[in-house]
Amino acid sequence: MGDESENDPAIGTGNQDELIMQQQRQIEREISETTALVGDLEPIVSLNNEYSNDNVYLEKIKDLSSKYKHIRRTRPDGNCFFRAFTYAMIEKMLDNANELEQFFKLIETSKADLLTLGFPEFTVDDFYETFMDVLKRVRDIKGVNDAKKELHSLFNEQGYSDYMVVYLRLLTSGHLQRDQEFYSCFIEGGRTVSDFCHQEVEPMYKESDHIHIMAACAALNTGVRVVYMDRGSSKSNIEHDLPEGTTPSVHLLYRPGHYDILYL
Amino acid sequence: MAGSALRRLMAEYKQLTLNPPEGIIAGPINEENFFEWEALITGPEGTCFEGGVFPAKLIFPCDYPLSPPKMQFTCEMFHPNIYSDGRVCISILHAPGDDPMGYESSAERWSPVQSVEKILLSVVSMLAEPNDESGANVDAAKMWRENREEFNKIADRIVRKTLGIYIRE
């Protein structure tokens, strides 16, 4: 942009909006980059450091540590549910070759379903292939511990990690659209299910709500337990199994605006 | 990951070359650098921009398609949704949440399954039907609303200019 445009008041207002957005992005980036995409296992009590003077939270951390041993933090970038969920699920399946094989087949056939729904192939391909590539790479490693290490390192490479997130977003969107009659009653603001998917599910960095979690679980044929920890007055944390009545394969900790992975 | 961005841009270029949408040509300016494209957009028929051929450039971020490209016309433009320096301001070029113009909630937004083709088609619709609620160019928006005849005259001059026809005022 030349000097000329900077003196033009009409452009000035436009630029200002963009500058504010850029600055906001920059701040978000700086905050998020201090946290790994997917962190190491840490004891539950490590949460105490974040709430040293907050008795409500300290009490709830105590409750949490009576049920769970470890927490694995994820980067708070709006993708945390999708990233945490995919990671935790694959990690768990590395202990069970049968489950992993079934999951592999489910993902393998999932692309065809997305194309049937009208997703253009050349925009889906890269995400699908990256997801399959990661599954193959961890599956082909003999030792479970080595496979878990590889998973951890792939999930901390932005290129792989973000593409995994996108593909799960697409599968979630696909599921919502396939079952739109059911999901339409959970969507507020008079939007259609496909509008909702285009605006709240498919774009990166958009945070997840109950409906995302329900659909993601259904798409991957699994269940998740979400433990809600907030400043509410109850002494213990509230647990939700999604979809209701399923046996959870993944446990996530939700604090307002963010998901991390929990380990029994 | 630049590797994936490059692969995706090459796939999109191939797609656009094999199946070009009507009235649109687009591709990298220089095949050494797939992150800068030029596009030529024909003004949609039956609108005041009919007959014009408008050049624009597209700049892709290294995390494309996670983030959208930026688009800027390189010819003179006068349109409610185009800044006077040519930058295009439509919802599909923004992720949800990025809301410089307070787009309607139903407006189409950027996501990794959108594409260059979708953007260019949206730009063609934008030329045909300006959104005078989101005023990137306030003067153009006001004139579009209040003095269509004058707006059409300016558009006509710009169309001729893109074709290299010089008209004395």
Image (cartoon, grey):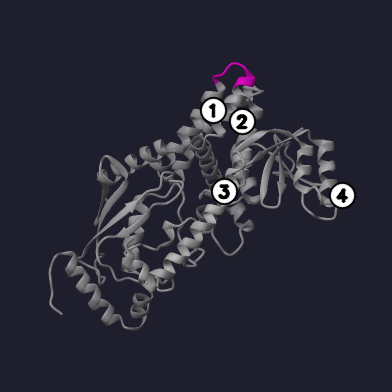
The residue under the point 54% across, 47% down is A173
Secondary structure, mark 3, is: helix
Secondary structure, mark 1, is: helix
Please, which chain is the residue tagged with disc 2 on?
Answer: A
Q: Are marks 1 and 2 on the same chain?
A: yes
Q: Is residue B96 magenta?
A: no
Residue at mark 3 = A30
Residue A240 vs residue A18: left or right? right
Dot 3 or dot 2: first in sequence order is 3
* Front: mark 3 or 2: 3
Q: Is residue A141 magenta?
A: yes
- Asked if residue B48 is positioned above or below residue B66 in the image, the reply reads below
Q: What amino acid does circle 3 point to?
A: Glu
- Asked if residue B46 is positioned above or below residue A126 in the image, the reply reads below
The residue under the point 66% across, 23% down is A95
Q: Residues within 10 Å of mark 2 (few under 14, many from 20)?
A: many
Give how far apart the Cα atoms at labels 2 and 4 are.
32 Å
Magenta segment = A140-146
* Front: mark 3 or 4: 3
Q: What amino acid does circle 2 point to?
A: Ile
Residue at mark 4 = A235
Secondary structure, mark 4, is: loop
Dot 3 or dot 4: first in sequence order is 3
Residue at mark 1 = A135
Q: What amino acid does circle 1 point to?
A: Leu
Give how far apart the Cα atoms at labels 1 and 4 are.
40 Å
Residue A71 image offset from top left, x and y in percent: 72, 36
